[in-house]
């Protein structure tokens, strides 16, 4: 793992981030997008992040190529939610189980220290023991499950909601 750098995401990472995300769109229920995203769509998503503030994106890179990412984004649109964030984490196929998710989340949360954030939320489509494991290991607690909230691949999926206190 010493050959992997954890750093803020850069514009040049976007094609790799798109490939990682689209793997999950096409092959898993872990995102509820049903069609692969285009580079233009992911650019719009990427534009929400900045090097400072509450909304950030970090990548794990090997040889300069992103192999995973963790982000914080707006939780909901209404103003009273401003001190809450939604987090997400995705790893390239074959990169799980090596502690990379933990390292990405740790970098993200270290960068967010001092920001006006009270809670971080993460949704986990079930079953997903790897995601449940990294969230609980980093101090997220399960606060409930939305039963059969999304339909993908011809079936309904539950989503567990996790929360981490940050203030």
Image (cartoon, grey):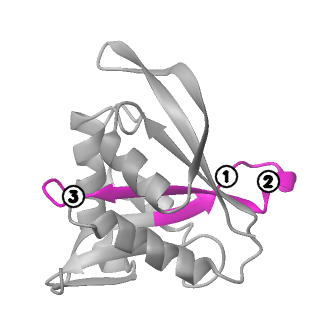
Q: Given the current orientation, which residue lies at the most extreme top position?
A: 154
Q: Inspect this view and state whether residue 50 appears.
A: no
Q: Is residue 90 magenta?
A: yes
Is 93 situated left or right of 147 in this image? left
Name the residue at 41% across, 45% down.
132
The answer to whether residue 21 of the structure is visible from this angle is yes
Where residue 53 appears, as percent x and y from the top left, is 66, 79
Q: Earlier in the sequence, mark 3 or mark 1?
A: 1
Q: CA distance from mark 1 to mark 2?
A: 7 Å
Other residues around mark 3 within 10 Å, as few (<14) / some (14–19) / many (≥20)? few
Residue 6 within the magenta-colored segment of the rendering: no
Q: Position of residue 5 (x, y in %)?
A: 27, 85
Of the two numbered discs 1 and 2 on the same chain, state the one appearing first in sequence: 1
- Nearest the viewer among 128 and 150 is 128
Q: Residues within 10 Å of mark 2 (few under 14, many from 20)?
A: some
Query: Residues under labels 2 and 3: Cα distance?
Result: 33 Å
Asked if marks 1 and 2 touch (Cβ < 8 Å), the reply is: yes
- The residue lying toward the viewer, choosing from 2 and 28, is 2
- Res 81 label: 2
Marks 3/1: CA–CA distance? 27 Å
The image quadrant where one finds the C terminus is: bottom right
Q: Which residues are magenta?
A: 71-95
Q: Which residue is mark 1?
A: 75
Position of the N terminus, as image quadrant, is bottom left
- Where does the image place residue 97, in percent across and percent down from the top left? 21, 58
**What residue did someone put label 3 on?**
97
Residue 17 lies in what quarter of the image?
A: bottom left
Kind of element beneath mark 2: helix
Residue 113: image quadrant is bottom right
Residue 72 or 46: which is nearer the viewer? Answer: 72
The mark lying in front, picked from 3 and 1, is 3
Task: Return the disc, 2 or 3, that comes first in the chain's sequence.
Answer: 2
């Amino acid at each position: 793992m010493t050959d992997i750098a954890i750093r803020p995401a850069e514009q040049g990472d976007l094609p790799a981030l798109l490939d990682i995300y689209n793997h999950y769109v096409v092959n898993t229920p872990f995102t509820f997008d049903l069609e692969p995203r285009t580079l233009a769509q992911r650019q719009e998503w990427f534009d929400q992040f900045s090097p400072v503030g509450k909304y950030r994106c970090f990548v794990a890179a090997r040889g300069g190529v992103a192999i995973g990412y963790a982000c914080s984004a707006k939780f909901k649109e209404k103003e009273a939610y401003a001190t809450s964030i939604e987090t997400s984490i995705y790893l390239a196929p074959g990169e799980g189980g090596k502690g990379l998710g933990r390292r990405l989340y740790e970098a993200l949360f270290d960068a967010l220290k001092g920001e006006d954030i009270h809670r971080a939320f993460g949704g986990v489509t079930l079953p997903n023991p790897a995601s449940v494991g990294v969230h609980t290991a980093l101090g997220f607690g399960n606060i409930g499950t939305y039963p059969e909230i999304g339909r993908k691949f011809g079936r309904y999926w539950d989503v567990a909601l996790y929360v981490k206190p940050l203030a």
